[in-house]
Amino acid sequence: MNGSQHILAAFHRHNISTVFGYPGGCIMPPLYDALVDDVGVEHVLCRHEQACALAADGYARASGQLGVCIATSGPPGATNLITGVANAYMDSIPPLLVITGQVPPSGLIGTDAFQETDILGMTLAIVKHSYLVDDPPEDLPGILEEAIDLAQAGRPPGPVWIDIPKDILLSDIEAPAPPDCTEAPPADCPEIGPALAMLRSARRPPLLYSGGGVSLAGAEDRFRTFAEVSGGLPGVVTLKGIGNAGRNNPNDLACSACTVPGRPTRRLTSATSCS
Amino acid sequence: MHGSRAANKAVDECDLLFVIGARLDDRATGKLDGFAPNARMIHIDADAAEINKLRPADLSLRGDLNAILAALTDAIAAEPLAIDAWQKQCRTWHTTGGFRAADNEEPLAPITGPPAFIRQLSGITGDDTVIACDVGQHQMWVAQYYQFAHPRHHLTSGGLGTMGFGLPAAIGAQFSDRTRTVINVTGDGSFMMNAQELATIRRYNLPLKLIILDNQCLGMVRQQQELFYNNRESQIDLDDNPDFVAMARAFDIPALHIERTDQIRRGIETILAYNGPMLLHVAISREENVWPIVKAGASNKEMIDEPPRKTNSRKEQVA
């Protein structure tokens, strides 16, 4: 299998059935050629790479699944993805995988070649992690597994960018496909006794204040049950918490913060080990 | 910045704030020293970096929200909190101090009240509907007036406020489930940023619904210039927009235009019932503002309410 076929194999292994992309010089001969014969992946051709990234974001937000966007090198290709990827990064919620083509390293990288750009350098501030696949090509399958896992695991999920030179996408890679190393972290729960005591001892009643973390954890049902069972605790939500209480909930005081929040502090995240 | 007075009052008056999965961003809290000044705080989050970052927690619980909430529910079920009076108080605040309660109901009046439009939209759509907004006043009205059954049904660009987000995000959401109703609510400014994606909708025959609230300007910026910059308008005028209905039809997507209050319900029902993509162009008044509003950098206590609205009711004029 060549590098492109390894990418499609990784998509199949991880049940990635929809990707949003736009072809171009560095990505077209390898990956888009491989797509012709592939039946498992639906490639959605948007009309602008920015829309590819934003569509992958919307897909991920609505479904909770990994959003995938693909573009060629550049400007114009990869750089047109930047706004969409930054948008996903700032909101933390959508897990995103970004795959871009890159000019071949031998003889071309660093020469201001056609549609060449240091996209990894440009995007350091807006990704959870990024990779430039270098020699040997056999690294690619392992990087794919790690990247797919990293985009979704740890807290919070976020964009992971893989920049792949054209010659690696075309290289025959004999390495066996690595096993699926996605594993759910154990659900950890600290001691809740003191919190319960504080709830009961409040002189005036408590107020729930919830945000995007509830849907990030998939904890909407637990949240609503807790609010109801506790005696019907009233609550307010932030912009990203809208919907936490459901429709027409009489105890929902609605949004207390309908505005765009600022940039989250960069933080360390832990990835599940593949070894 | 545009939260409800009722919600902010409750935050101000409570003595225990139970924060769950929220990072207390300064745009949400306003100036921190004015945020929940009387309250102790319990902070539950999966990310240790968010706890004690902006406001020290009196007690924190770091871990998986599902596990923590399940444990708390089990523990509290035996003896729920006695909070009937507080509940009543909060509901009263919500009724009297929530977002705008009524709008101009004159049938032939122009659609001057986008909240009325959004409220009607919310009343007509099903629980499974996904709304993808763009950025601007329409985004705030959706956040204030649309009732969402689930947080994943509300696609909004929060952190970056990216105009042009809505249409492609709606496309992505539709691909995740072709059977559900997905609506892009957008403004005339935002729509133009990624309008080329009308071709993608047509290409894949997505049954997407688009609603453009068209006030012929960059409304949110206009409002800020009106309220905080002595009404000095600068580069916000979009009165040379293209004919959006003709534009949609050029992409072989049917489209409707409405501009009167009595057309709202029929317009919404028509696009929702149509088997395929459809655009609804809604002409709204340029002067509409989002209320209430807190100026950037101010405390939530410095919230500015909507000034009394002039009525142009015929009945009152006759009297």
Image: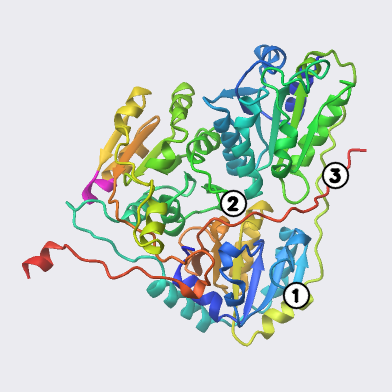
Please give the count of numbered marks on the rendered protein: 3
Name the spot of residue A197 as percent of width and height, x first.
Answer: 73, 81
Residue A113 against residue B1 in the figure, above or below: above
Magenta-drawn segment: B259-265
* Marker disc for residue B173: none
User: Which quadrant would residue B83 be assigned to in this image?
Assistant: bottom right
Question: Between residues A161 and B282, which one lies in front from this camera angle?
Answer: A161
Q: Residue furthest bottom?
A: A203
What residue is shown with label 3? A272
Q: Confirm or deny contact between disc 3 and disc 2 (CB under 8 A).
A: no
Name the spot of residue A11 as percent of width and height, x first.
Answer: 73, 27
* Marker disc for residue B59: 1
Q: Is residue B129 visible?
A: no
What SS does tag 3 mark? loop
What residue is shown with label 2? B159
Do discs 2 and 1 share a chain?
Answer: yes
Which residue appears at 57% of the width and 48% of the height?
B160
Q: Disc 3 to disc 2, how far (Cα)?
A: 27 Å
Identified by mark 1, the residue type is Leu
In screen coordinates, is B6 left or right of A129? left
Identified by mark 2, the residue type is Gly
Q: Confirm or deny contact between disc 1 and disc 3 (CB under 8 A).
A: no
Which residue appears at 74% of the width and 66% of the height?
B51
Do discs 3 and 2 share a chain?
Answer: no
